[in-house]
């Protein structure tokens, strides 16, 4: 083919590649501007955005508060990734990878930084003793599915989601390739949920909190507007589970934190107390 792309011997970034995030994508890391992060009065400081990865953390924090764990009280500050706020010096100090979410636990004598959403889930579950089984075999099964999500979701988000929803041009090969993989993953989850009430068994765990914002949102029609395209109705066990998780009050609360789009009653860019969430949810018709 005369127009076939031939990779250069050494790749260099000569121009932006187009698309929604082109202006912030670069092949280097580190801070791009000096700015300290805001610090609230609560023990836990979260700097994030209500993407699926961000929702994982606000959901577990709201679940912990619902259990009466007052030490899980938190301030959540919006990080506008479209404006490059994840490249501030303050954010990079917490997460050198410049990806949301990033958390600082200031409850001890020395602040503990935690980055990567899966690591934050494990940290909070272990710290407060909830949502991760104490039985070693059940804990291992929970971590199996947590790590499955951390490895699988990039195929859904950076793969299927990018080429189906965000790429500046639509190309058949990558959409077909990642749609196939996404449907394989949906089938994996559907077969697991045919045998269990929740992802890792009969107990609600951090595995559910990790997987629901991605795959639950997808089959409920809240992600990439792709439910019909992927025929999600053909995964009834997954749809059943997704609806059950969506009805949890802590999930309803957690999914709106650090959100700045959508309906008025689902936007809470910054959160400092339970009253902040109550005020927003009370706007729901």
Image (cartoon, helix red, strand yellow):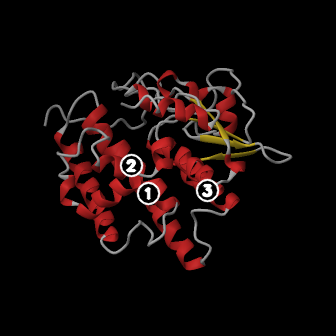
Q: Which mark is residue 67?
A: 3
How many numbered dots are placed on residues in this image?
3
What residue is shown at x 75% (from left), y 33% (from top)?
Answer: 41
Task: Tell me whether circle 2 and circle 1 mark residues in contact (CB < 8 Å).
Answer: yes
Instruction: Look at the numbered disc 1 and give the secondary structure of its residue.
Output: helix
Residue 154: x and y in percent read: 40, 48
Q: Earlier in the sequence, mark 3 or mark 2?
A: 3
- From the image, state whether disc 2 or disc 1 is nearer to you: 2
Q: Is residue 6 visible?
A: no
What residue is shown at x 72% (from left), y 31% (from top)?
Answer: 40
The answer to which quarter of the image holds residue 235 is: bottom left
Residue 187: x and y in percent read: 26, 63
Q: Which residue is mark 2?
A: 214
Residue 78: x and y in percent read: 56, 29
Q: Which mark is residue 149?
A: 1
What residue is shown at x 83% (from left), y 45% (from top)?
Answer: 110
Q: Is residue 53 above or below residue 149?
A: above
Instruction: Look at the numbered disc 2 and give the secondary structure of its residue.
Output: helix
What residue is shown at x 70% (from left), y 35% (from top)?
Answer: 93
Q: Is residue 28 left or right of residue 31?
A: left
């Amino acid at each position: 083919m005369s127009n076939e792309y031939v990779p250069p011997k050494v790749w260099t970034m000569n121009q932006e590649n187009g698309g929604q995030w082109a202006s912030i994508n670069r092949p280097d890391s580190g801070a791009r501007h000096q700015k300290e992060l805001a610090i609230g009065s609560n023990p836990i400081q979260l700097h994030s955005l209500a993407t699926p990865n961000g929702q994982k953390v606000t959901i577990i924090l709201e679940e912990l508060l619902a259990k009466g764990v007052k030490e899980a009280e938190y301030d959540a500050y919006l990080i506008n990734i479209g404006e490059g706020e994840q490249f501030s010096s303050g954010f990079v100090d917490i997460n050198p990878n410049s990806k949301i979410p990033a958390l600082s636990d200031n409850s001890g004598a020395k602040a503990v930084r935690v980055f990567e959403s899966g690591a934050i889930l494990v940290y909070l579950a272990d710290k407060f003793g909830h949502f991760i089984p104490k039985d070693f075999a059940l804990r291992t099964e929970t971590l199996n599915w947590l790590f499955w999500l951390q490895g699988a979701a990039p195929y859904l988000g950076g793969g299927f989601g990018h080429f189906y929803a965000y790429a500046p041009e639509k190309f058949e090969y990558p959409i077909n390739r990642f749609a196939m993989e996404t449907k394989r993953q949906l089938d994996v989850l559907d077969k697991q949920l045919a045998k269990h009430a929740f992802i890792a068994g009969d107990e609600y765990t951090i595995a559910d909190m990790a997987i629901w914002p991605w795959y639950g949102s997808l089959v409920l029609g809240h992600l990439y507007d792709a439910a019909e395209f992927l025929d999600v109705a053909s995964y009834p066990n997954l749809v059943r589970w997704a609806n059950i998780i969506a009805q949890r009050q802590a999930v309803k609360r957690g999914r709106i934190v650090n959100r700045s789009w959508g309906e008025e009653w689902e936007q809470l860019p910054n959160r400092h107390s339970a009253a902040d969430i109550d005020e927003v949810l009370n706007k729901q018709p």
